[in-house]
Amino acid sequence: MRFRDRLLSETRESISHSGRCALPEEGLPEPLARLWDDVHRAVEESCRRFGETGDIQSGIEYLRKRYVSEKLDGPPRFDSESVRLAYAVSYHPAHAFAYLHLLMRRGLGQVIFGDLVSPPKVLVLGAGVGAETLASLRWMSAVETRLVAGSRFVLVDRAAWETTRASVLAPTVRELWTQHKFVFDEVTSDLSSQQGLDFLREECGHADVIFCPSVISEMISEHSQNQMMEVIHETINRRAKLVLIDHKDPEFEHVSRQWARRFTVLSDGATPGVIIPQPTAWVRSHLLDGANHRIPTKSYPMAWSVLKAR
Ligand SMILES: C[S@@+](CC[C@H](N)C(=O)[O-])C[C@H]1O[C@@H](n2cnc3c(N)ncnc32)[C@H](O)[C@@H]1O
């Protein structure tokens, strides 16, 4: 079943069961508060439904440790639902929040989407649950509503995130989807493999926006980012934007600067830390409880480059 069909069928149940959780912080701008509320309601409901909180806790510990030793041991693998849900609760909300923060408060939304005359086709490389997709949809629906209906998001990842997205992402975008019909496609493909690079070669030229959200840092530890970037550089549409966005990290910033020399830079920058609101009480008492590295994220230092072909 295509994502948008599952989106409708699976979210009815989840939303009616869960109700609305309290907004995490007073005074947050509406789109950020909505995103935080939506994402937590969906994550909490998905974890409760999965049931095995011990497995999700182990997944969070695995991810926390693996990201610390990523450069030595390689990035984590997302082969099991418990690890994917662990990511959904411990990284996805903070990423979605940080991306939307940058779109709104650092003007990246206007840089990326502001000059588009029609709804974009967005290619997301290393999409995971789809934090950047949520943030982009929230930004577009708040600021450039005309771009939402008819837009198309192609979520590419080497791990099979479909089930996780159906429970975590679908409820949060359902409301938007029923108002403005946009399209999701999901592709499972390893972008360091020949097959993945061939797929990219075919798709890149059709995209208006190519997002690389927190994937380059993972590829750097496997030394596979250059091939992917080379294909993007060869095939990107002249009007398209390439968005490299990741945790602020010297290696990511170095790779980002290297690639920036071959493109026109529309925006680049870094922020010492986007302050992340606290998760819900249930998530804090069952999953991000502070024990064994299961510590909630408080702040994300982020870096980005928005590039265009020369
Ligand atoms: C840190 S997660 C980022 C997920 C999401 N974009 C976000 O910001 O929360 C990185 C994702 O990149 C994917 N990934 C890493 N290397 C990849 C590759 N060679 N090809 C495709 N996906 C890859 C991983 O499976 C993972 O889902």
Image (cartoon, rainbow, N blue to C red):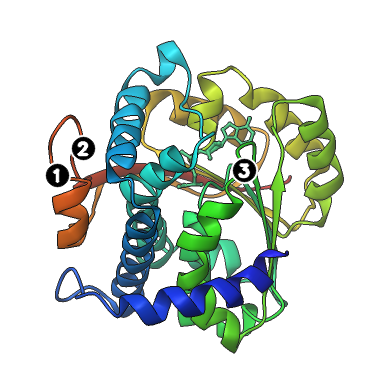
Horizontal arrangement in the rendering, residue 79 relative to residue 187 (left or right): left
Three-letter code for the amino acid on which mark 2 is drawn? Arg
Residue 135 coordinates in the image, percent (x, y):
46, 64
Residue 211 in the figure: left or right of residue 36: right
Query: In the displayed structure, would residue 68 be above or below residue 125?
Result: above
Q: Are marks 1 and 3 in contact (CB under 8 Å)?
A: no
Residue 294 is tagged as: 2
The residue identified by callout 3 is 160
Query: As drawn, is 39 to the left or to the right of 283?
Result: right
Farthest residue to the bottom: give it. 179
Residue 289's tag is 1
Q: Neighbour class for label 1 at 10 Å: few (<14), some, many (≥20)?
A: some
Quadrant of ligand 1: it is: top right
Q: Residues within 10 Å of mark 3 (few under 14, many from 20)?
A: many
Q: Could you tell me which secondary element the residue under label 3 belongs to?
A: loop
Quadrant where the N terminus lies?
A: bottom right
Question: Amino acid type of disc 1?
Answer: Asp
Measured from the top left, where is residue 240 in percent x and y? 71, 56
| Up-down relation of residue 232 to residue 44 (above or below) | above
Question: Disc number at residue 273?
Answer: none
Calculate the distance from the C-alpha at mark 2 to the C-alpha at mark 1: 6 Å
Image-quadrant location for residue 182: bottom right
Residue at the image point whose x is 57% and y is 61% from the top? 112
Separation of disc 1 and disc 3 at Cα?
28 Å
